[in-house]
Image (cartoon, rainbow, N blue to C red):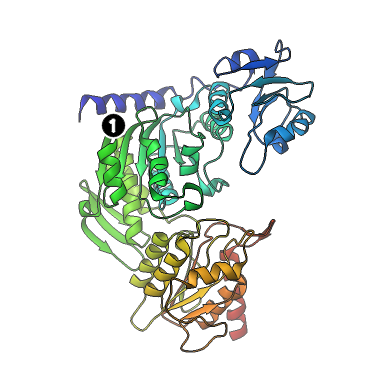
Amino acid sequence: MSEDQRAIGREIFRKVVGRRSGARDPLMELTELVSSIETLSILGDTHGVVVTGISFDSRHVGPGDLFCAIAGEHYDGHLFIHDAVARGAVAVVVERFVPLPIVQVRVPPGSMRVQMAKLASRLYGNPSSRIPMVGITGTNGKTTTAFMLASIADAADHSSFVMGTLSGYRTTPESPVIQSSLHRAIEDHCDIAIMEVSSHALDQHRVDEIIYDIGIFTNLTQDHLDYHHTMEAYFMAKSRLFEAARCRIGIVNIDDPWGVRLIRDSLIAMETYSIDDAVDLHLGIDSSSFVLDGIPISLQIAGKHNVYNAMGAIKAAKRLGYSSEAIQKGLETFRGVPGRLERIDEGQPFKVFVDFAHTPVALEAALEAARVITPEGGRVIVVFGCGGDRDRRKRPLMGEVSESLADVTILTSDNPRSEDPTVIIQEILSGMTKRAMTVLGESSQVLVNPDRREAIEMALSMAKEGDVVVIAGKGHETHQTIGQKEIAFSDQEVSREILRRQRSSLQ
């Protein structure tokens, strides 16, 4: 171990020992708070103005808050300042003054999110400096890797704080939410903070003012090109996590070509992992086992992709000082996360899984895992769609993956949002060669039903003993977005309801 790596270890230890010493209630005079940011001018008297919170959404403003008016792509926060003041905002941060009797701090145009991150970090006492921080980025595997690491921490009797898609956020939240959440984690005596870090967050300065002790890169495959437009831009956004000012040490999957490039270009200390590092690898029907760095690992979840997730968690856990025993126990007792190849069992003679796979590579991993556990003579049946108002270029690719790995594909709606579900389905079909049918036939390999509930019922009704059904795309989500409406919908609950009804009809 190099002297630099020893220094990193000492810094992590310092945070664990001293994590409780700096936590304090958020309370700061406005004049002191804004001294940490770049301002152009201030309108109004700041004397005696005390800030107790920071908000960027006028609907969530509380008394004592400083409201940051973000001029976003769809909404301009300046238009909601009146509402924020009515809800108790004591001052506002703006890029242009508005005619309202409220203290206004004007910042350079286009810099609102940069300044907001500085304000949030300052108000909450720079919490990331007082707790070991792990950031995980990549297209697939972030959530599972995060919860694997949390399970290892739990096996060592450490309390972890995990922020990601299962924490109620669709992506990494804005900086005030992150900083206040970290502050509360310290108040709750958490020993480690583990964050999923999205490309949007890195690009939009949501994780500015955070220094990660460890950054994990899982992989990079096509997604979010509606935002980034090119894979190069997507990669550059992800790579910002591994800048010297943001991360102390990186852990990188070098079986991914973008990971190889990340290693080549990075200026920080890096550690790598590869499937070739897994000695005695065995992929079973419901489990996997391997040896990594001399530690025998037994996973109670299937899939080669989960071996990769575990390897990233193991490398991070070792860097954090967790023992081999804690790593073994944490991964052996890990049973997966909701919506990631989550088993749905109502006593039916076939297997059903719900998975969050919404990219070509994630769908490929889920279907390959399903194929491994499908007995001879059994079929892999998949139900999926693609989200509306998102990367359209991945739709035919997902159709191609499904056609190559599933015996039966049922195309349906995901979250169509403002798009016509039938148009989305046609774009998926453009990547497939077989003819889609709207009615069920014995020889049909591709079926279409835009109604997701009906599509799931089609799959479960056709499944026989030995088959494996994968319901992909939404995973842990509990709502379906159709137009401007959020409709309650859970793949798990719908599947269970249908399976129970089928079982009752046979009794």
Which residue is located at x 73 percent, y 22 percent?
Answer: 90
Which residue is located at x 51 percent, y 29 percent?
Answer: 186
User: x%, y% of residue 384?
Assistant: 51, 68
Please, what is the three-letter code of the amino acid marked with disc 1? Leu
Which residue is nearer to you in this view: 365 or 147?
Answer: 365
Residue at the extreme top of the image, as rendered: 47
Residue 481 visible (yes or no): yes
For label 1, the residue is 267
Q: Residues within 10 Å of mark 1 (few under 14, many from 20)?
A: few
User: x%, y% of residue 434?
Assistant: 44, 80
Quarter the N terminus occupies: top left
Locate residue 14: give its quadrant: top left
Locate residue 264: give its quadrant: top left
Q: Would you place residue 221 above or below residue 363 in this image? A: above
User: x%, y% of residue 311?
Assistant: 30, 49
Q: Is residue 52 toward the left or the right of residue 355 in the image?
A: right
SS label for mark 1: loop
